[in-house]
Image (spheres, rainbow, N blue to C red):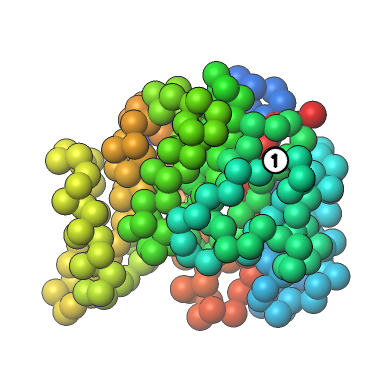
Amino acid sequence: MAEPFVYRATEENGGLFTMDQWMDKEPRLTAGFTSRLGGVSSGAFDSLNLGLHVDDETADVIENRTRLAAALRVPFDACTYAEQVHGKEIQVVTREYRGAGRTSREEALQNKDGFVTNEPGIILHALFADCVPLLFFDPVRKAAGLAHAGWKGTVLQIAKATVETMSAAYGSKPRDILAAIGPSIGACCYEVDDGVISRVDKIAAELPVYVEEPFYVSKGNGKYMLNLQQLNRQIMIKAGILPSNIECTGLCTSCRTELFYSHRKENGKTGRMAAWIGLRE
């Protein structure tokens, strides 16, 4: 299967991963995932760090966010950010929230890890450095969604919560929704313990019996290699999204630190990429 997040390297922005399949079908749509390349941050945050919460220079982060907006051909005041907390709360983003958090944490959408909108001119952003970006687009209702799924958000089934919110807010039918699972730490690199696996097992019992890959593999010492992408995919299917409408990356943030920040690989001292989605005005 072809990689759905297509890398575009340019002199202006270093490189972005874009959802070309979706954007070809809906020309106003912009959706994708940033690399770590093409910004002004230095040291551990070299160079396109988009997180204001990681002790990078605030002015550098704002410059990086401004550069991203320019690369996406959207106004900077359309770019909307949140303070993420590894939960499952979903924000319906209307015009009044447009541009929240783009220059300060205090003005961001607070305590939210998922976002939906159907208003053109609002570009949703969420921040990542190993956790799983989940992108949603309903081409019928012209509604977009974005969620941040670490292991906590995954076992809280934030993917299902996002679909349910799109259905309630916009009348989206799950069978119409396109979904994508973006660059994140893979089962090749994501070691967890019994505490995490016990939570995974609880929700795995509710998921479809047939899965293409196991959710985790035991290393035999109370440690396991966890496949968060596959787990989120099955939660999406449970929520009613058609398997054929789910795109899944083959990119691991921990394996590819020349392209991505990895909280696990870089021992917590690193920057943040952004996933984004929205319709241009």
For the point 53% across and 66% down, the residue is 85
Describe residue 71's horizontal placement relative to residue 197 as left or right: right
The answer, for residue 134, to whether it is visible in the render is yes
For the point 57% across and 63% down, the residue is 111
Q: How many numbered badges does the structure rendering display? A: 1
Rendered position, 145 above or below 257: above
For the point 59% across and 30% down, the residue is 143
Q: Nearer the viewer, residue 232 or 112?
A: 112
Q: Which residue is mark 1?
A: 94
Residue 122 rendering spot, x and y as whole percentages = 73, 40
Task: Look at the image and tell me in which quarter the N terminus lies.
Answer: top left
Residue 226 rendering spot, x and y as whole percentages = 29, 62
Rendered position, 10 above or below 2: below
The residue type indicated by label 1 comes to Thr
Element type at marker 1? loop
Question: Which picture quadrant has residue 200?
Answer: bottom left
For the point 71% across and 60% down, the residue is 108
Question: Which picture quadrant has residue 51?
Answer: bottom right
Q: Residues within 10 Å of mark 1 (few under 14, many from 20)?
A: few
